Image: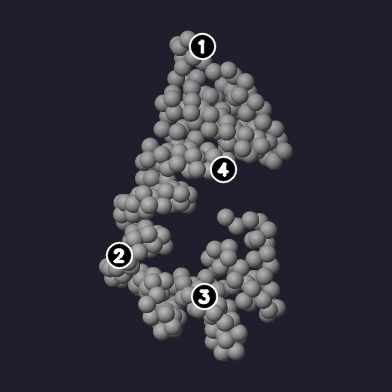
């Protein structure tokens, strides 16, 4: 994830390059380093270097990295002839390269030649079954075709090999959520929390899923994860604070008629409600009456 400082640096350099102030190569390198997609800019400025023999030769071995970067940017922008030309240059320089083979498969994808792309990827995986990029390309290709069940299948197979890929777990969770497969999404967030227990986003997403699933046990657990989100964010997550209040109300409804020992202490929900009101007073005072009314309807 790109930090605010890095984003500021990138935007400043981009404006400098766009205004003719130099720093084109530094900008392209920074885009690659941060792994962000500024395809139109990379295509434009990258070609300005590649089409100038003097600038191109000054890059040394980095010339080939730029050809690769421009090829991918050109595919993003649907400038397939440019991408094809860049890949041809790389094929000539590295005739047996698997990395160039991946680019060929991506070009087939960009053309919509799905069967040919799958054939190319399968061939590459025979030589290297642990090629992470190609496994991810298969997922992307299934999604591009609208084959969501295929994307789920490929992601699950991918995660059997690369279990530590947090982005893949999150992607799979989001697909399950879009299909209202909440139990499967909950499992993905459990894996993310196990591997990255201090990321509040995962605690919050897991709590949301459990709240949606409902049922007393799920609501009790959801409330705990909303509380952990509040703790991890220093008490500043409005959604989590509201989640505590919603869970409290739902739990109270489901716990009617049960022993007092089974009921929860009102302290947490009281603190959450107070924190919410304070937050609204500071940031959205005109909406405070709506919040107060909503909390009253929840009997908080």
- Expressed as whole percent of the image width and height from the top left, the position of residue 259 reads 48, 10
- Establish if 42 lies above or below 287: below
- Bin the neighbour count of mark 1 within 10 Å (Cα to Cα): few under 14, some 14-19, many 20 and up: few
Observer able to see residue 165: yes
Is residue 74 visible in this depiction of the protein?
no
Looking at the image, do the residues carrying marks 2 and 3 touch, with CB atoms under 8 Å apart? no
Which quadrant of the figure contains the N terminus?
bottom right
Q: Give the residue number, with chain letter if any, for mark 1.
A: 261
Q: Calculate the distance from the C-alpha at mark 2 to the C-alpha at mark 3.
A: 25 Å
Upstream in sequence: badge 2 or badge 4: 2
The spot of residue 108 in percent (x, y) is 34, 72
The residue where tag 2 is placed is 126
Q: Quadrant of residue 89?
A: bottom left
Q: Which mark is residue 23?
A: none
Indicate which label's residue lies in the foreground, 2 or 3: 2
Between residues 279 and 53, which one lies in front from this camera angle? 53
Q: Nearer the viewer, mark 2 or mark 4?
A: 2
Which residue corresponds to mark 4?
A: 199
Q: Secondary structure at mark 4?
A: loop
């Amino acid at each position: 994830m790109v930090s605010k400082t890095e984003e500021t640096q990138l935007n400043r350099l981009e404006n400098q390059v766009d205004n003719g102030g130099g720093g084109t190569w530094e900008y392209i390198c920074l885009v690659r380093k941060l792994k962000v997609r500024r395809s139109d800019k990379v295509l434009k400025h990258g070609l300005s270097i590649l089409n100038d023999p003097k600038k191109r030769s000054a890059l040394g071995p980095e010339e080939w990295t730029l050809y690769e970067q421009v090829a991918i940017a050109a595919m993003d922008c649907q400038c397939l002839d440019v991408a094809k030309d860049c890949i041809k240059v790389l094929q000539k320089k590295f005739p047996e390269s698997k990395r160039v083979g991946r680019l060929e498969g991506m070009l087939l994808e960009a053309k919509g030649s799905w069967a040919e792309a799958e054939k190319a990827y399968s061939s590459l995986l025979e030589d290297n079954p642990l090629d992470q990029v190609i496994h991810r390309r298969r997922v992307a290709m299934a999604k591009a075709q609208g084959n969501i069940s295929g994307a789920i299948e490929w992601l699950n197979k991918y995660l059997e090999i690369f279990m530590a890929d947090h982005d893949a777990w999150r992607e799979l969770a989001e697909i399950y959520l879009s299909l209202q497969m909440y139990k499967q999404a909950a499992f993905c967030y459990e894996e993310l929390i196990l591997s990255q227990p201090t990321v509040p986003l995962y605690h919050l997403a897991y709590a949301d899923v459990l709240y949606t699933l409902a049922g007393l046990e799920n609501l009790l657990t959801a409330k705990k994860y909303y509380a952990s989100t509040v703790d991890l964010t220093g008490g500043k997550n409005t959604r989590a604070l509201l989640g505590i209040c919603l869970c409290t109300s739902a739990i109270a409804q489901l716990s009617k008629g049960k022993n007092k020992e089974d009921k929860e202490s009102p302290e947490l929900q009281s603190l959450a409600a107070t924190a919410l009101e304070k937050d609204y007073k500071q940031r959205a005072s005109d909406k405070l009456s709506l919040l107060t009314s909503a909390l009253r309807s929840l009997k908080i």
